[in-house]
Image (cartoon, rainbow, N blue to C red):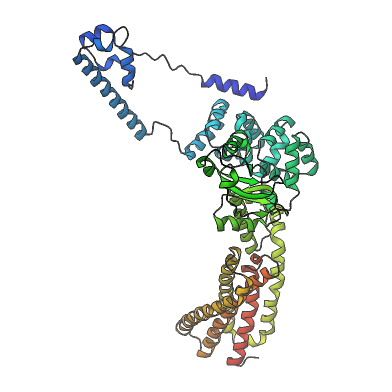
Amino acid sequence: MTELEKDILNSDQESATDDGACTENTLDKADLNEAAVTEDNVTEGTAAEDVVSNDADGLEESELPPEVEEQIMNATSALVLEADANRAQDQEAGDEPEDDEESQVDIMKAVIERKDFKEFRRMAAEMNEADVASVMEELDESELLKYFRVLPKNIAADVFAYLPIDLQQSMILMLTEGEATNIIENMYVDDAADLFDEMPANVVTRLLAKTSAETRRTINQLLKYPDDSAGSIMTTEYEALKLHLKVSEALEKIRNDGIDKETINTCYVIDRNRKLLGTVTLRSLLFAKPDIEVGDIMTENVISVTTLTDQEDVARDFQKYDFSVMPVVDIEDRLVGIITVDDIVDILQQEATEDIEKMAAISPTDAPYIKTGVFETWKKRIPWLLLLMISATFTGMIIAHFEDALSKYVILTSFIPMLMDTGGNAGSQASVSIIRALSLDELSFSDLPKTVWKESRVSLLVGATLAVTNFGKLMLVDRVTPAVAAVVCLTLVVTVFVAKLVGCSLPMFAKKLGFDPAVMASPFITTIVDALSLLIYFEFATMILGIA
């Protein structure tokens, strides 16, 4: 007997309890004749129809006097009302377990802590697979494997699909070949392809060798598509109907093989060469006459993507047309798969995370932060930091060039950080707005003149407001001369103007040249604006104060 079987046996023995025998009082014929009906004749909470069936032992309903029937009905009604009241009190007191998913997750965690495998298996069968996976992913690998093997076979593959990809890859190697093959065969093929995408080729070959020929062929086909393309995220498990199929035949086909499809809400009409002709919804099939052809009720205006379409463009199409599923065709317009909205949600999260990391000067990574090692994190951050550090040397060179001039007006040095920070912040505001607009496809390179004109007006208003406010602070608080205040305030206006122009134009030029606009974000723009703000500052100081 294995250790797991011993744990389950002990758990069963500990969970066995003696609840006692439940007794039920019944009404006999003598009691009915005497009309002595009380609450003791039935168990609390027994329904009225149970009482009527119990009191009918050898006595016809028509044999009871009317007053006896009335007493029976009154007594049973009172019992039902009392039972309802008790049940309501129990719910208010919290005696009944809450059905919300948070409480179920907490209960399952407690079940795992006391190693109650039988109760864990029962709860897993009743809970959502995503909630079960969220609990299991917190276990260490040995415990994870043990509890995974306890799961009912009909939900094991679904729970596995909700686990993080790194846990999937480690678990699939710890399972026996038979267990691993069973999991792969019961997963949706797009999820299986994602699992194999980052695994060593020899491991993938060994695992696929045990799967069916159809599964192996489909997964290999998906793995051949480029990363971040529509082909790499699609699934081939869709419902296709022939053009001249009767509605009744189509519904019968859906009943027979629809259970294995990713979705049957939208079916795709194809010809003998699998060319996509149209779509038909399950709703349309249900309300159509059985003897008409599918081609008569299909929608011919089909919006689709190709296997090589970028996944970001696919996500935009989903957002634009409010789709829940979209067909994928090859270069000959033959239907090869579909993309569902659950994959699009993952893509949107992935792309947003990638853009945020690039805007913070970090090389993107797919691994969760807590599971990324120190050395891996260092590799992702150091290249950009080195580049920005080297580019920042130009700022130091500018200050060093005007060192002798600054010695005559030392007060000018104290305003350098404020001017550089204000310029960097102004540029970051513009760049983030433009990068977001570009990612949402709200702007294109042809909109550059309009964008520059708008940001120019905004920068003048912002710069003027900051300059007036700062002039009052310089004169009343810092007590500087009007000439020094003029240098600082004029620099502020021009710096904000230049920063806004740089912040709005660089991302658009990057997009035009084929680069990710997110690269031209805060750190990069701040470095450029810092150098420009110093040049502007010392130029005004030379003109007004006469420093050389």
Instruction: Quarter of the image for the C terminus: give it.
Output: bottom right
On the image, the x and y values in percent for residue 336 come to 69, 47
Residue sitting at x 70%, y 31%: 179
Viewer-side residue, 449 vs 471: 449
- When the figure is inspected, residue 264 is found, relative to residue 112, above or below; the finding is below
On the image, the x and y values in percent for residue 212 come to 74, 34
Q: Is residue 225 left or right of residue 429?
A: right
Q: Quadrant of residue 67?
A: top left
Viewer-side residue, 412 vs 47: 47
- When the figure is inspected, residue 383 is found, relative to residue 109, above or below; the finding is below
The residue positioned farthest toward the right in the image shown: 202
Residue sitting at x 48%, y 80%: 465
Instruction: Quarter of the image for the N terminus: give it.
Output: top right
On the image, the x and y values in percent for residue 227 come to 72, 53
The residue positioned farthest toward the front in the image shown: 291
- When the figure is inspected, residue 75 is found, relative to residue 357, above or below; the finding is above
Q: Is residue 165 visible?
A: yes
Residue sitting at x 65%, y 73%: 506
Q: Is residue 367 visible?
A: no
Q: Is residue 61 left or right of residue 345?
A: left
